[in-house]
Image: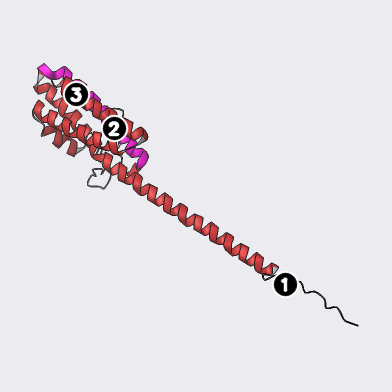
């Protein structure tokens, strides 16, 4: 009589406990990996936003300087006072719009503003007691505006601002590109129409 051998069922290579342990390890790895990737994404995006805000900052300051210079020139060139008033109002609007975009991208870089527009340098002036002093206009804006003594000086500043805004508009995207394109177009009108 022959004895039938029982057929051996191959034993699972991985035990139930091993399967649970491996599943837990993989799950933990996925969660940690996703966390690391998310952290890298946020950090990289913040860096990109800050870089863009830093590119916009000189445009905002230049617009404030141009507005102050146009206002000062209106008193010295009464025949151009109406055109210079339009330029001053438009450039102050540009300064405010660009500063609002800077505040959205990187609040630390935005200049404080008031109902009359952008008014201060990013670094506050302090009194001898260490408290922030009230600032009515950024000293750098006042000083730079005082250096603009003729309409031709203002025209040159507006031309430089137009080039800078157009360059960033071309490199930008979405709302920011449209806003900067509009600023560049307004500057073209100021140069070729208001100051013609």
Classified by dominant secondary structure, the portion drawn in magenta counts as helix
Q: For mark 3, what is the residue?
A: 190
Span highlighted in magenta in the image: 79-106
What is the crowding at mark 1: few (fewer than 14 residues within 10 Å), some, or many (at least 20)?
few
Is 160 or 71 nearer to us in this picture?
160
What is the number of the mark on residue 180? 2
Q: Is residue 80 magenta?
A: yes
* Above or below, comparing residue 61 to residue 189 in the picture: below
- Residue 3 location, x and y as percent? 87, 81
Q: Position of residue 179 (x, y in %)?
A: 31, 31
Mark 2 and mark 1 residues within 8 Å of each other at the beta carbon = no
**Front residue (pair 19, 92):** 19
Does the rendering let one see residue 57?
yes
Alpha carbons under labels 2 and 1: distance apart: 70 Å
Task: Decide which of tag 2 and tag 3 comes sooner along the chain.
Answer: 2
Q: Earlier in the sequence, mark 3 or mark 1?
A: 1
The residue lying furthest to the bottom in this view is 1
- Quadrant in which residue 91 is drawn: top left
The secondary element bearing badge 1 is classed as loop
Identify the secondary structure beneath mark 3.
Answer: helix
SS at circle 2: helix
């Amino acid at each position: 009589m022959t004895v039938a051998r029982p057929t051996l069922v191959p034993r699972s290579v991985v035990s139930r406990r091993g399967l649970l342990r491996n599943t837990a390890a993989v799950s933990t790895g996925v969660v940690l990996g996703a966390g690391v990737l998310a952290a890298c994404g946020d950090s990289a995006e913040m860096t990109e936003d800050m870089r863009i805000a830093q590119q916009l900052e000189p445009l905002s300051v230049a617009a404030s300087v141009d507005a102050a210079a146009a206002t000062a020139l209106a008193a010295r060139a009464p025949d151009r006072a109406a055109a210079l008033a339009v330029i001053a109002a438009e450039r102050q609007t540009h300064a405010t719009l660009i500063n609002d975009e800077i505040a959205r991208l990187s609040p630390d870089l935005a200049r404080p503003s008031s109902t009359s527009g952008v008014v201060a340098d990013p670094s506050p002036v302090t009194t001898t007691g260490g408290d922030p002093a009230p600032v009515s206009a950024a000293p750098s804006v006042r000083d730079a505006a005082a250096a603009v003594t003729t309409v031709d000086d203002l025209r040159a500043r507006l031309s430089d601002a137009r080039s800078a805004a157009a360059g960033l508009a071309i490199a930008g995207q979405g709302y920011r590109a449209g806003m900067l394109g509009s600023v560049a177009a307004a500057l073209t009108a100021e140069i070729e129409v208001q100051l013609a």
